[in-house]
């Protein structure tokens, strides 16, 4: 290659496929690539179009219905779980509020006893 790009001999070498310049070398590479992709030769895992029959379309609708049902079930589970958590939290807070109330009553009773003791000692 020259400093200014490809020379005429470089272009000829790149375009020559080693088979007399008839262009079959490029076609062989194309067939090799298509064969590796499995395209159109009857072997490999190539794409084969399917036509939408009535059963095929019905199966699609049935699958969509199943997805909707699964989504509804998941929504119900999530709602039930959130309700259970909310109820558990409310019960916990109610219990804690009751304990704090009883603790407050106990502190008042102790304070009253201390006042009563102080009055007895003072008399």
Image (cartoon, helix red, strand yellow):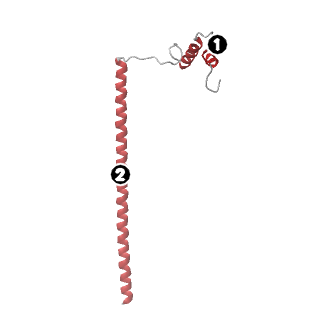
Q: Nearer the viewer, residue 87 or 41?
A: 41
Q: How far from the left and from the top, in percent, is residue 88?
A: 37, 53
Q: Nearer the viewer, residue 2 or 80?
A: 2
Q: Secondary structure at mark 2?
A: helix
Q: Is residue 59 above or below residue 80?
A: above
Name the residue beneath numbered marker 2. 86
Q: Nearer the viewer, residue 56 or 121?
A: 56
Q: Secondary structure at mark 1?
A: loop
> Distance from label 2 to label 1 (Cα)?
78 Å
Q: How far from the left and from the top, in percent, is residue 76?
A: 34, 41
Question: Residue sitting at 36 percent across and 75 percent down?
Answer: 109
Q: Quadrant of residue 66?
A: top left
In the displayed orientation, state which residue is furthest to the bottom: 123
Quadrant of the image containing the C terminus? bottom left
Question: Residue sitting at 36 percent across and 29 percent down?
Answer: 64
Q: How many marks?
A: 2
Question: Residue sitting at 35 percent across and 51 percent down?
Answer: 86
Q: How far from the left and from the top, in percent, is residue 45?
A: 51, 19
Q: Quadrant of residue 103?
A: bottom left
Q: Crowding near pointer 1: few (<14 within 10 Å), some, many (20+)?
A: few
Q: Nearer the viewer, residue 29 or 76?
A: 29
Q: Crowding near pointer 2: few (<14 within 10 Å), some, many (20+)?
A: few
Question: Residue sitting at 35 percent across and 40 percent down?
Answer: 75
Q: How far from the left and from the top, in percent, is residue 68?
A: 34, 33
What's the mark number on residue 6?
none
Q: Quadrant of residue 60?
A: top left
Q: Is residue 67 above or below residue 20?
A: below
Residue 6 lies left or right of residue 47; in this view the side is right
Name the residue beneath numbered marker 1. 18
Circle nearer the viewer, 2 or 1? 1
């Amino acid at each position: 290659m020259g400093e200014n790009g490809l020379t005429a001999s470089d272009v000829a070498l790149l375009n020559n496929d080693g088979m007399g310049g008839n262009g079959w070398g490029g076609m062989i590479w194309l067939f090799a690539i298509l064969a590796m992709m499995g395209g159109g030769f009857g072997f490999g895992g190539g794409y084969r179009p399917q036509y939408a029959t009535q059963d095929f379309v019905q199966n699609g609708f049935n699958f969509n219905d199943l997805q909707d049902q699964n989504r509804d079930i998941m929504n119900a589970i999530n709602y039930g779980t959130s309700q259970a958590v909310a109820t558990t939290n409310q019960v916990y807070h109610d219990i804690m509020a009751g304990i704090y109330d009883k603790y407050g009553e106990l502190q008042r009773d102790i304070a009253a006893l201390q006042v009563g003791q102080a009055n007895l000692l003072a008399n």
